[in-house]
Image (cartoon, grey):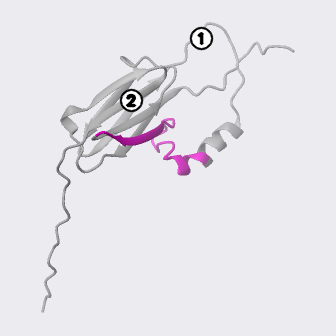
Amino acid sequence: MSVPTRREPRGLVPDLLDWLEAPFSGGRSYTGGRMVRFEDTMKDGHYIVRAELPGIDPESDVEVTVENGVLTVHGERKEERSEPHRTEFVYGEFSRSISLPPNADEHNVKAVYHDGILEVDIPLTEEQPKAQRVPVEKQS
């Protein structure tokens, strides 16, 4: 078995599979960024969002922002290599945004990175916004 000595292009198939998967998983952003896989849960009055981000430096390669009820994870996975090689890893910029629950406390969000997983903890307030009925007037 020989090991390739040059980097081989990824080709059409991996990119095509990324695009086919994107609509079902929230997928790739239309700005050219790579897909970030999220999972979320409610636990003990907190909304927890976990993002799969292996191979990044959390202090320099990722930015987490919360604004107007939207959580955004943006960053870049950089390729470091010293000799030609073949890779199926995905490098480059990534970005993903999701809406937060209406009672999210945007001022007390915490994020921790461990073993390739970014975990964002958003506390929830006791108050749930209530629906407000809007009267409809008939014009003559």
Residue closest to the eye, 30 or 117: 117
Residue at 18% across / 35% down in the picture?
Answer: 107
Few, some or many C-alpha atoms within 10 Å of disc 1 (few <14, some 14-19, many ≥20)? few
Residue at 46% across / 40% down in the picture?
Answer: 39
Q: How far is disc 1 from disc 2 in space, using C-alphas?
A: 28 Å
Residue at 87% across / 15% down in the picture?
Answer: 1
Residue type, label 2: Glu
Q: Quadrant of the rendered structure where residue 76 is? A: top left
Residue closest to the eye, 102 or 139: 102
The residues colored magenta run 21-44
Residue type, label 1: Arg
In the displayed structure, would residue 139 be above or below residue 81? below
Residue closest to the eye, 102 or 87: 102
Tell me the residue that label 2 is attached to.
119
Tell me the residue that label 1 is attached to.
81
In the image: residue 41, left or right of residue 86: left
Q: Is residue 28 magenta?
A: yes
In the displayed structure, would residue 61 be above or below residue 44? above
